[in-house]
Amino acid sequence: MSETRFDPSQADGRWQRAWDEKDCFRADSASDKPKSYVLEMFPYPSGRIHIGHVRNYTMGDVLARYKRMRGHEVLHPMGWDAFGMPAENAAMEKKVHPGEWTYQNIDNMKAQLKRLGFALDWSREVATCDPAYYGHEQALFIDFYESGLVYRKESAVNWDPVDQTVLANEQVIDGRGWRSGALVEKRKLSQWFLKITHFAQDLLDGLEGLENWPEKVRLMQENWIGKSSGLQFRFALSDGDSVEVYSTRPDTIFGASFVAVAADHPIAQKVAEGNAGAQAFIEQCRAGGTTAEELETAEKLGFDTGLTAQHPLEPARQLPVYIANFVLMDYGTGAVMAVPGHDQRDFEFATKYGLPIPRVVAPTVEEADKPFEGEAESGDGVLVNSGPLDGMSVAEAKALVIARAESEGWGEGKTVWRLRDWGVSRQRYWGTPIPFIHCESCGVVPVPKDQLPVTLPEDVDISTPGNPLERHPTWKHTTCPQCGAKALRETDTLDTFADSSWYFIRFASQPADKPFDPAEAAAWLPVDQYIGGIEHAILHLLYARFWTRALKYIGQLDVAEPFAQLFTQGMVTHETYSRKEAKSGQTIYYNPAEVNRTGEGAVLKVDGDPVDVGRVIKMSKSKKNVVDPDEIIDSYGADAVRWFMLSDSPPERDLPWSEAGIEGCARFVQRLWRLFGQYDPAAEGDDKVLARKTHQTIAAVAEDIEALSFNKAVARIYELAGAVEKASPSASRSEAIRAILLLIAPMMPHLAEEGWVSMQESGLVAETAWPAVDENLLVDDEVTIAVQVKGKLRDTLTVAKGLPKDELEALALESEKVQRFLDGADIRKVIVVPDRLVNIVI
RNA sequence: GCGGGCGUGGCGGAAUGGUAGACGCCGGGGACUUAAAAUCCCCUGAGCUUUGCUCGUGCGGGUUCGAGUCCCGCCGCCCGCACCA
């Protein structure tokens, strides 16, 4: 019996070293065991891990360790998404080289991760900024190019004139650069693109098979891909020209009352040439805000071009042509046929400009002239006021109009996608150089594979805006691999999403001379369980799905989908503590460490005066409601922190951090330690009830872990621990204690190892099997059944399991409590559910 | 606006249509101690006329012997997308 306390400050490190020395977590690709690939989204090396990482990686670690105990060969790797803007920003601010800054951060974060005792195969660690990684990415990019999946195109980009750089859409806030605050311009630049649209249909179809992805994520991807089908057709214009429009509702063609084109449409441009009014209107459209609220409240505005369009099915009808602010140039053809009766935007526009709003779809034929009730009706119905289409369903009419347009040659059925090709050019330094050379005579030429990697220059000037590669004195000057003439390197680097689109493949197989070995990679892939934040629901996951398809397309990897199972975990949240400054009116936030919680409220430690306790929100630096992983590990040890991450909240929901909660976890660590001290291998005697509970718990915890329902597994372990503490010594009790140790091993591995030693067991728990379940002990031989009168609980009975219905009924009727409620009334019916309940209806 | 999700004690949350509130946290009471910490035990949804009864899972209806769970209609919160023709 040990009276000492479990001391994580010395035990944690000792076991981490023991695992390292035995190389416990190295994955063997050649193993015969069933393979499990457990992966958490790799972090950006910002410098410090945050509590969200701890939660994410703890979940993955529990699964990885559990799978190992179940006899699987587990691949559980870690690496660094190490390219990107923050390194350049840091370089500008702190005058350090982005590479130096990044590798320093990696060192820090790796040390932090090690302290948590994760069962990671560090031998496969990759950093995407390592030429040994991005060189292979360059090779793949060239392969894609040669297979027609990469192309260059003039494209409008968000250009920040102050920072002299291209900004991603999400870096443009209210039309201004997020960093410089300068008004962002649209510029035409020659950009590199990956042809993701080539796989649009396949990416959409593939979602069907991803049953183990959250429905939410699949829907978001489906919406992002945005397939629609309709009719593309032409209107002849009064100036002899024509305008091409796209509609998903060609059935409503007889309800068209005008044609609208985008401000950037060539027709609008042409009209504006000799027309100051049109010119002004177009300017106004461009200046329009881009924020959600502005778009929502934006009034539909138009400019009448004076042109008219001839209706293709009623040549006598001429429709006015407007430039309209609600038509987007980059969707469909940038021009629409407007059907106000059955499209809300057209309805608003027509109402404003007094245009006709004909009804061409009605609930029934009889309601052909039913008035609209203040809004368009976009639902299903039957065609009316539409000549040859009258009486048809929407679907029939659609098909007929498309068929007629095609046979008469004025239009054709067309599928339109919202998904665009992936623009990967970035005018940045800290990214993968795009491995191409521009030669005056040969054009764009890929760098020969034997000259890869194209590495970044070390001596680089980050201090001023613009692309450092572009202005580097020598780097871009080279010779053409084809003709040997002087030529220039491409100075764009790849979007960092490219780096994260295949890292999981490199983890699975990392030969030096090529990106991966197809057979070895395919042996591990797809990732069995991928865990990460919902914020990557669309882009990262879509790009990785694309990259996998592209590799299959060029014959390099025979894997259909990269991630078989996806789990998106919730955030770690915390209360905020603040005070409003009387003088300035500013709100000052305080870190949890500066505050003492006092039951109802909270006070500041330094002055003892109260602070306002705000709502529980995502941890953020600006609200100071952050906790530092290192500090809490120092205070409570890795296992208590890990246990907290798994307790209470379902993993997909937010987890509120609390001081009281982590203290409870630390207490439980010690409670288990005392329990392990009571293990007595020589104890004798059966405790049937406890043995049942033990085996039921083993089975249930296994199920919970496999379903990632860690909070339920935790609750069950608490329950079993409570039962063991109450039980008298017996062989069953010792068995239960040993089982608890193995059940918590994936969650609190250091405590488990330490307990294992105290039990005088040999070897490492990390290399021990999950406890076996005795199936015979899973079912109880007694059950407690509810006895209800008219559906209300009146008594419970403990009876032998499987007692026949009539006996149960008889027992229930004998109950004194039941008799009291029956009070001599007639029994109308008795419902008996064996092993569950008896309900007496009077 | 469209799409999705969620509403259960003071808090985080359990609950194949079958005993609502498991488990944890907070709180209260007690034991041990000179005292404290640690530990252990008990209580802890609300109300009441307290051997027990009534009410109770956002609100209002419904289906059912029986509803947190299923159906219909509301209300509130959260997330995603958005003039996508």
Image (cartoon, coloured by chain):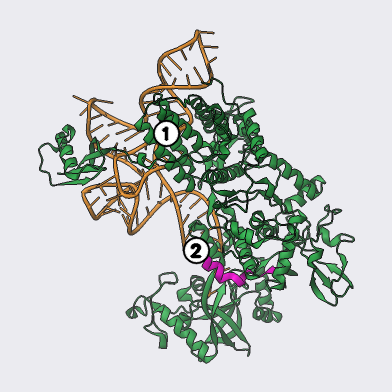
Q: Position of residue A817 (x, y in %)?
A: 18, 33
Whether residues under marks 1 and 2 lie with C-beta atoms below 8 angstroms apart, the answer is no
Residue A774 in the figure: left or right of residue A797:
right
- Residue A110 at least partly seen: yes
**Chain letter for mark 1:** A
Give residue A47's quadrant in the image.
top right
Chain A shade: green
Residue at left offset 81%, top offset 49%: A97
Based on the picture, tell me whether residue A811 belongs to the magenta stretch.
Answer: no
Structural crowding at the residue carrying mark 2, measured as other residues with C-alpha within 10 Å and reported as few (<14), some (14–19) or many (≥20): few
What's the amino acid at mark 1? Glu
The residue identified by callout 2 is: A209
Q: Relative to A708, does residue A581 appear above or below in the rendering? A: above
Please report whichever mark, 1 or 2, sits nearer to the chain's N-terminal start. Answer: 2
**In the displayed structure, does residue A642 sit left or right of residue A440?**
left
For the C terminus of chain A, the quadrant is top left
- Residue at label 1? A719
Taking the magenta stretch, the answer to whether it contains residue A205 is yes
The stretch of residues the image draws in magenta is A192-206
Callout 1 and callout 2 share a chain: yes
Which secondary structure class fits the magenta region best? helix
Q: Is residue A415 above or below residue A292?
A: below
Image point 36% across, 39% down: which residue? Answer: A777
As measured in the structure, the alpha-carbon distance from the residue carrying label 1 to the one carrying label 2 is 38 Å
Picture coordinates of residue A392, whole percent (x, y): 38, 82
Tell me the crowding category of disc 1: few under 14, some 14 to 19, or many 20 or more residues within 10 angstroms, Cα based.
some
- Letter of the chain shown orange in the rendering: B
Q: Is residue B12 left or right of residue A577?
A: left
